[in-house]
Amino acid sequence: NPCSGFGGFMCLRHLLLSLSLAAAAASEEKAAAGEKEAATKRPSSLAPVVGYRGIYSQLHLNDDGIPKVLMLLGGDSDTGGGEAPSWYSSAAMRFKQGRTKTAAFFAVAAGRDAARAAARFGIEEVPPGGAIFVCASGKARRFHFSPEAGAGERSRALRSTVEAAVSGEAEEQDLQPLPSFPEPDRPRKAAAVTLDEFTHESLPLLCYGVKAKPLCVMALLLQPSGQGCPAEIGALARRHRNDPVSFGCVGAKGQADFLAAFGLEQASLPALVAVKPGRRARFTALQGGGGAGEGGGEGRLEASAMGAFVDAILGGSASFQRLPELPELEPPYLLGGEGGKDEI
């Protein structure tokens, strides 16, 4: 037995060490194979595949000012997807030096996306091998290649066509206008709804002053200050949250001078008043009909009427009257009993 005695101990130790090294090598080889497989599955940065809605960004927003090469991938119209062929990515590599590109390549996913893009270029059906267009200066030229040609031959022919576009020496024949594609959706950020019950302190600031918008719309209500704004005014404010309008309400009970400035009286309430503050202040008003008695307040402002009122203002068809002075509200403690002063 070659591994007997003291020499056998050393022999066994050597054998165990050999087995350990062999296992480590096998593990590293397996990890390297996994990394290589993952790399092959990673989307190509040289020729990324986009959907129909991503075409506009690739043509007009990304890498602006250089020729764009797009490939409509052929394939099953129901499954979609796909990757750009390696010969196409190889051609793209010739136009990238470090982070600088002289031409940008991308592909449109096979299936419905490619079919929709093909219709824009006037193609009834995307060939199984795909269709390629070289786009520059608002024009597009289709690059024709034979499916029977080798990958290297196709790559070289495409590079030659793109190089002519990059140098500006491309022939004018067979050019077609670059078709338009829909811009990507840009969600409009909804502004916060602002609705205030204006008081004698906040009215000059929020409706007339530095924190005011170009138009201030306020509901004048037959109620004391402090009772808040009705839901209908809140709905109107939400509808126009992105418009340059401040919305609010006023408890106008007992505010005779304030109402008179707008040609109103207590019997006219409720009413909706729009004010354009500034050096030449102007206003327009919508009355809710008032009530049957002298006190008024039994009429109402219909949501449809208020909406039409604001739409007419924003549309420029409303008629405004000059406002010599911006009226102010009396503090509640200076009003009579009906104005909201607590009687002792």
Image (tube, grey):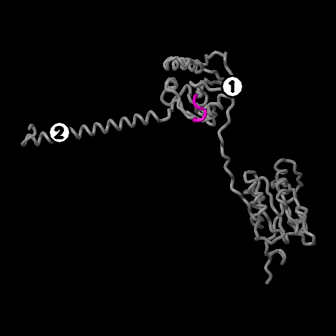
Q: Quadrant of residue 125?
A: top right
Q: Residue at x 36, y 35 (%)?
A: 32
Q: Is residue 186 left or right of residue 218?
A: left
Q: Residue at x 79, y 61 (%)?
A: 232
| Closer-to-camera residue (299/13) | 13
| Closer-to-camera residue (240/157) | 157
Q: Is residue 123 magenta?
A: no
| Closer-to-camera residue (183/204) | 183
Residue labelled with disc 2: 15
| Closer-to-camera residue (204/266) | 266
Marked residue nearer the N-terminal end (2 or 1): 2
Pick the quarter of the image with the N terminus.
Answer: top left
Q: Residue at x 51, y 33 (%)?
A: 45
What are the residue bounds of the magenta stretch? Answer: 73-79
Please tell me the numbered disc located at residue 168. none
Name the amino acid type tagged 1. Gly
Could you classify mark 1 by the number of other residues whose Cα lies within 10 Å: few (under 14), some (14-19), or many (20 or more)? few
| Element type where label 2 sits in the image | helix
Residue labelled with disc 1: 122
**Residue 61: image location, x then y, percent:** 62, 34
Q: Is residue 274 visible?
A: no
